[in-house]
Amino acid sequence: MSSADIALRLPRDATLHSALAAALAGAFLLSLAVGPAQLGLMEVAAALFGGGPEPAQLIVREIRLPRALLGLMIGATLGLSGAGLQGLFRNPLAEPGLIGASSMAALGGVVAMYFGLYTAFPLALPALAMLGALVAVTLLLLLAGRDASTLTIILAGVAISSLGAALISLAINLSNNLFAVTEIVFWLMGSLADRSMDHVWLTLPFMAAGGLLIASCGRALDALTLGDDTARSLGVRLTRTRIMMIVGTALAVGAGVAVSGAIGFVGLVVPHLLRPLVGHEPRRLLPASALGGAILLLLADAGVRVLPTTAELRLGVVTALIGVPFFLFLIFKTRREAA
């Protein structure tokens, strides 16, 4: 890339990131303002910093703030992971569930509910969900081997994901407790309701560590767009890059699933929406996708609170309703390009 290209690219990226950051700030404030209790932006701002009536402070700081923070964190990690995996596998349909981390993390949460562990220790659910994600990574690395090809990694990920889904179905099938089954099904649909700052502090270190691992692979992902052989000639260690991406995705996405349940399609949709604005360099797409994922999930979570339904829609249902038509569009677009 010439110095002229870089000089043109930097202001454009700065403008895009500034616009996304401004949109993210707006979505975050909207998430704090939306809910059954009607609060204006000034009331929200005052309550956030310890001012205003005590009930408003309780609503904003104890109920809405953790929900907004988790929406930002989970959306950012899903967008970042999706962009990273699409760059790693050079596949526009890749998304975080591809390596099995989401499915096995969900299985860990189901185990906590199936045996009633979360009633005695509320944080048992997110702790076991993150353990499930780490188990998925361990299995993936053992199945794929040290010098596995991209196809082998994908096949191993599909096998692990299928195993997690089968065991979840088995737990639901064997349960004699209707209440437990209902809890499992609703949790699997995904939601940020009734979360606390304990969940934020529990998952933040894992999400931060996973995000840093993914972000550190930016240069290697750019090199991979030229092919494996060319990337090796440029000094990229493919095995190390794949391990860092897979472990980073498992940590970040597993921690997200641990507190929100299964939320899909964010990691698929956001990179595709932003790729035309940043070009086809994965390193440039990573920060933009993190910001875009946070915006999408915050807006979707605000949307489920304002829709006139008798019961609040589950967040995973809304993201699926957004993502499935987009996924089908990508399939038909890929088929047309291949024809």
Image (cartoon, grey):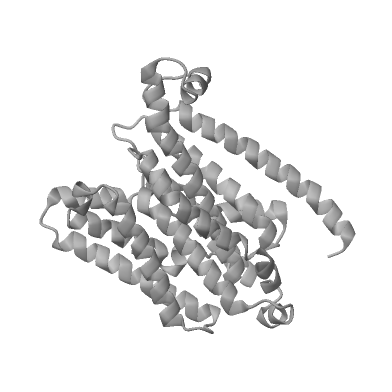
- Image height check: is 77 above or below 101? above
Left/right placement of residue 318 relative to residue 77 reads: left
Q: Residue furthest right?
A: 4
Residue at position x 61%, y 78% from top? 238
Residue at position x 55%, y 65% from top? 85
Residue at position x 58%, y 47% from top? 292
Measured from the top left, where is residue 319 in percent x and y?
A: 44, 48
User: Visible in this render: residue 50?
Assistant: yes
Residue at position x 14%, y 63% from top? 174
- Image height check: is 155 above or below 257? below
Dividing the image into 4 quarters, which one contains the C terminus? bottom right
User: Visible in this render: residue 326?
Assistant: no
Q: Residue furthest top?
A: 53
Measured from the top left, where is residue 148 in percent x and y?
A: 52, 83
Left/right placement of residue 271 relative to residue 167 reads: right
Instruction: Give the number of callouts.
Output: 0
Left/right placement of residue 53 relative to residue 41 reads: left
